[in-house]
Image (cartoon, grey):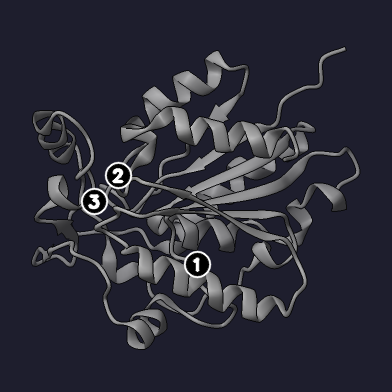
């Protein structure tokens, strides 16, 4: 009897919406994976914005709870900003090994994500390491932020360039003022976790990615299971090299 594959819960990034993942989700479905990508409310928010990171956390937590209650084993695949609300949204009650029905999160994949230590913040990371990003962030009068050079920083390895330009037009505003504050959720300290470094990333430079992972490993003090993979990719390898990302997902799903 074929083993049921885990469900993939995708947490998209800050200037994105779920349709950015539609082609990759189709590939997951074709490979036999059920996949979900809830919309984060701070992305493409009302103008002026009304949603905060708490709304993003709630959207992820609600989706994960529904899947876990149905007995689904879940792999969380978080991208970019999505790493912050994803971490907050997965408490120990949603770990599969703590559930009565076997459903819950079994692994987290951070795909070129912000990885924040317990009781730390995005602001503290930037204060410690600097803003290691080539994104030119613009701010509207209502507090929403947008990427001025999305094609060059989010899609720099997407070919042809005309496709990168089209993808950039699909980016949305982000309620940047709502994403600050201390992060208390650290499921990566308890669950098997993979961080995927993207070496050509212009949005979160690979040096910063590695620094965050090293900080996390130091916090783990030799415990836990935080492994890394590396792609010769820009910020969105689910668009530029989806087959390689699929290999990582399949490897994790197979317990590798």
- CB contact under 8 Å: marks 1 and 3: no
**In front of the other: 32 or 241:** 241
Tag 3's secondary structure? loop
Q: Is residue 204 left or right of residue 77?
A: left
**In front of the other: 248 or 148:** 248
- The quarter of the image holding the N terminus is top right
Q: Tell me the distance, in whole angstroms, between the alpha carbons under discs 1 and 2.
A: 19 Å
Q: Which residue is mark 3?
A: 46
Which of the marked residues, 1 or 2, is nearer the chain's N terminus? 2
Q: Tell me the distance, in whole angstroms, between the alpha carbons under discs 2 and 3.
A: 15 Å
- CB contact under 8 Å: marks 1 and 2: no
Q: Which residue is mark 2?
A: 16
Above or below residue 74? Residue 108 is below
Q: Which residue ends up furthest to the right in the rendered image?
A: 100
Q: From the top left corner, tell me how far across and down residue 162 is, in percent.
A: 8, 30
**Occupied quadrant, residue 206:** bottom left
- Foreground mark, 1 or 2, reads 1
Residue at 34 percent of width and 87 percent of height: 127
Q: From the top left corner, tell me how far across and down residue 143 is, in percent.
A: 18, 67
């Amino acid at each position: 009897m074929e083993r049921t594959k885990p469900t993939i819960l995708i947490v998209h990034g800050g200037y994105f919406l779920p349709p950015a993942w539609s082609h990759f989700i189709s590939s997951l479905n074709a490979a036999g994976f059920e996949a979900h990508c809830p919309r984060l409310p701070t992305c493409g928010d009302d103008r002026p914005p009304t949603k905060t990171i708490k709304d993003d956390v709630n959207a992820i937590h609600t989706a994960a709870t529904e899947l876990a209650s149905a007995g689904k084993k879940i792999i969380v695949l978080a991208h970019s900003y999505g790493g912050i609300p994803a971490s907050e949204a997965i408490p120990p009650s949603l770990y599969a090994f703590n559930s009565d029905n076997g459903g819950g999160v079994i692994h987290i994949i951070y795909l070129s994500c912000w990885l924040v230590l317990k009781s730390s913040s995005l602001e503290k990371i930037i204060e410690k390491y600097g803003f290691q990003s080539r994104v030119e962030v613009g701010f509207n009068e209502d507090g929403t932020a947008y990427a001025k050079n999305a094609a060059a920083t989010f899609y720099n390895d997407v070919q042809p360039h005309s496709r990168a330009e089209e993808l950039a037009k699909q980016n949305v505003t982000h309620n940047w003022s709502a994403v600050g504050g201390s992060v208390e959720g650290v499921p990566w300290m308890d669950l098997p976790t993979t961080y995927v470094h993207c070496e050509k990333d212009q949005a979160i430079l690979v040096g910063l990615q590695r620094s965050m992972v090293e900080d996390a490993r130091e916090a783990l003090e030799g415990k836990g299971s935080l492994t890394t993979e590396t792609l010769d990719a820009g910020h969105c390898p689910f668009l530029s090299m989806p087959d390689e990302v699929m290999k990582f997902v399949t490897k994790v799903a197979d317990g590798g």
